[in-house]
Image (cartoon, rainbow, N blue to C red):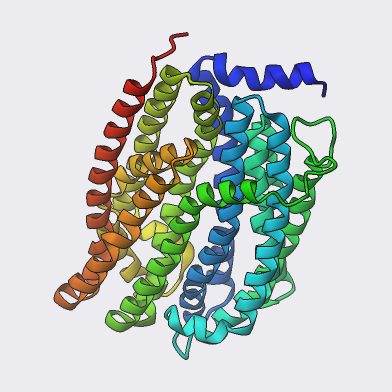
Amino acid sequence: MDTTEDDIRLKELATAPIGRLLVKYSLPAVTGTVVSALYNIIDSIVIGHAIPDPNVVAGIAVTFPVMTLATALGMLIGAGAATRVSIVLGQKDHRRAEIILGNSVQLSIIIGIIYASCFAIFIEPILMMFGASTATLPYAREFILWVLPGMVLINLTFSYNNVMRASGYPTKAMYTNMIGAILNAILAPLFLFGFNWGIRGAALATDISMMITCIWVMSHFFNRRNTLHFTRGTFRFDWSVIRSVLYIGMAPFLINVCGSLINAIVNTSLLRYGGDNAIAAVVVFNRFVTIFVFIVIGICQGMQPILGYNYGAGKHDRLFRTLRLAAVTAVIITTIGCIAAHIWPSQISGMFMTDDEQISEAVNCLRIATISFWMVGFQIIATNFFQSLGMAGKAVFLSLTRQIIFMVPLLFILPPIFGLNGVWSAFPISDVIATIVASVMLIWQIRRIRRSAPRVSL
């Protein structure tokens, strides 16, 4: 692809109608993120029905914090790289974008090897800390040890899928996740039901799917016809680039680290007040809300290059119109999730488990924990607005409010008073408070941007 076509591809970020542009970038991103969510959902459904032991579901739940932490380390590089690429492309600095790309790939590989090795060595004490019991530890350990090699590939794939989208290839980025999810949907049932490989089979299905997907996404950046590609000198470490990528990537990194910490605290609280059945119930909650959260994340990924480019170009009217449309859409999505959780809790729970006691507890969890889920979409959009503009400190703070500043104290205060229902109640209460804080900060930031520079009408 020649330079003129690249310029046209990027120019549309500054000139195309916001609604059409957001659909163009968000629809492939939403498709990709939802499809990627199917990795874990498919594994949970297949494992829950293929292996009759009810401890299996709880064992898989214990691995969530470990996988979330691994994802956090990948997002530290990938999200920061995507945001920086969008901003510098808006500033017409194409060479800087290529240097960001080359440096970020090396960092992703180095960090991936380090965390996979550390997890493999200390996996048993880590799992026990995250809520594993003697009954669930063998299942959790087997699954995580087999899936760890694939986590390095998952992080590399998802991270540079974001960069692919940010550089003007939203549809191709969608295909990346579709390839992996379709392969996993075929291989997981085959390995568990056909070959009878148990939990190991589900993990291997994920590993193989990610290996093929990683080859697909990285081949894009070796193609010199694409907007961004690897060139001579882009792999030379530039510490100013590394610092800027890590600074912006710190927000999603902390979001996922906090998610891992919260999962660990929740699991230990559930083990204390409800036992392994309560831990199994949180699988249903996590998997169900993941679908809707990932749709919102897809909207965020779609709006990110639009926000970053127009902020870098000083087009503030387009900035605010994009934010407004994305926020309204996100709230509609999470409201649908909230309603579904209260209308069909038994049917949702039955998809993931067969034990009657576990299903009963999962229904109770869904009804309480999702009361305020409808407002989560706005909170996610607000956090990603600050991240997309390179305001990492504010994005980090907003990510900490919901998952640390409010959630952790509630998990220590409510369960001793209300028992297991106190654990479930911590989720909606923290959602409400965090959304209020996000609203105040977002309004303040919008007013500040409007005062700092004249708006540009198109």
Place of residue 299 in the rendered image (x, y in percent of width and height, measured from the top left):
49, 36
Report whether 342 appears left or right of 233: left
Q: Residue most toward the top?
A: 458
Q: Is residue 387 above or below residue 65?
A: above
Nearest the eye: 348 or 68: 68
The residue at 64%/36% (across/down) is 165
Q: Is residue 360 above or below residue 295?
A: below
Nearest the eye: 395 or 153: 395
Nearest the eye: 198 or 95: 95
Report whether 161 appears left or right of 215: left
Place of residue 289 in the rendered image (x, y in percent of width and height, measured from the top left):
41, 53
The residue at 61%/18% (across/down) is 12
Count all numbered tags in the image, as a single digit: 0
Q: Is residue 96 above or below residue 306?
A: below
Quarter occupied by the N terminus: top right
Report whether 444 appears left or right of 285: left
Q: Can residue 326 be seen here?
A: yes
Place of residue 261 in the rendered image (x, y in percent of width and height, measured from the top left):
41, 69
Q: Quadrant of residue 331?
A: top left
Nearest the eye: 249 or 34: 249
Q: Residue most toward the left?
A: 417
Place of residue 23 in the rendered image (x, y in percent of width and height, measured from the top left):
53, 26
Q: Can residue 192 be seen here?
A: no
The residue at 43%/9% (across/down) is 457
